[in-house]
Image: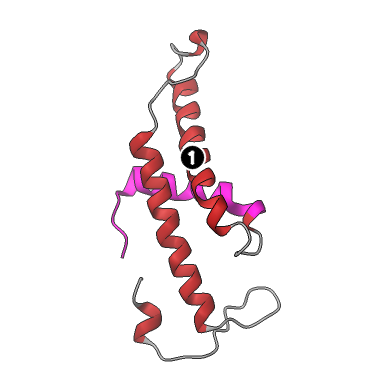
Amino acid sequence: MRNLNKKYDFTTLIGGHLNRVGTKEDVTKQLAFMSDLHAAAGTGLATTKMGEGMQPSDLTNPWAGFDNYIDRVTISCVNTLTPKWKDKLAGFDVFIYDQCLSMEQSLRIDGPSIQ
């Protein structure tokens, strides 16, 4: 994935989304964002401790613990990406939580490999 835009010489990308065509610079920016997203979610998974900051009464509920963990990993990812990307990507504020959650789920379930 990282070298995809280097393999193909193009100036215009018709992605079929929204109201403008894309450029090679758009593809480069998206690949950089995806790399940062992957790293931020991976760091969140590696540094977030299960059960930290939970109400004592919730600690015996494994579902509450897991939900709390996933939320904190996702928020860690959002907080890491926001300073760099909030003003560079359209819809960042609307979609970043879902993107971080999806990447966290993928890394946790499928493993850390990125192509």
Residue 85: give x, y in percent of width and height: 56, 58
Residue 11: give x, y in percent of width and height: 51, 90
Task: Give the magenta part as a residue range.
Answer: 93-115
Instruction: Estimate how packed mark 1 is, as few (under 14), some (14 to 19) or many (20 or more) residues with alpha carbons within 10 Å.
Output: many
Residue 19, compared with residue 89, is above or below; it is below
Which residue appears at 37% of the width and 39% of the height? Answer: 45
Which residue appears at 58% of the width and 51% of the height? Answer: 96
Foreground: 58 or 47?
Answer: 47
Q: Is 74 displayed left or right of 21 in the figure? A: left
- Which quarter of the rendered picture does the N terminus lie within? bottom left
| Residue 27 included in the magenta stretch of the image | no
Residue 61, compared with residue 37, is above or below; it is above
- Tally of numbered discs: 1
Residue 52, compared with residue 96, is above or below; it is above
Residue 4: give x, y in percent of width and height: 37, 78
Foreground: 32 or 106?
Answer: 32
Tell me the amino acid under the disc marked 1. Answer: Ser
Q: Which residue is mark 1?
A: 76
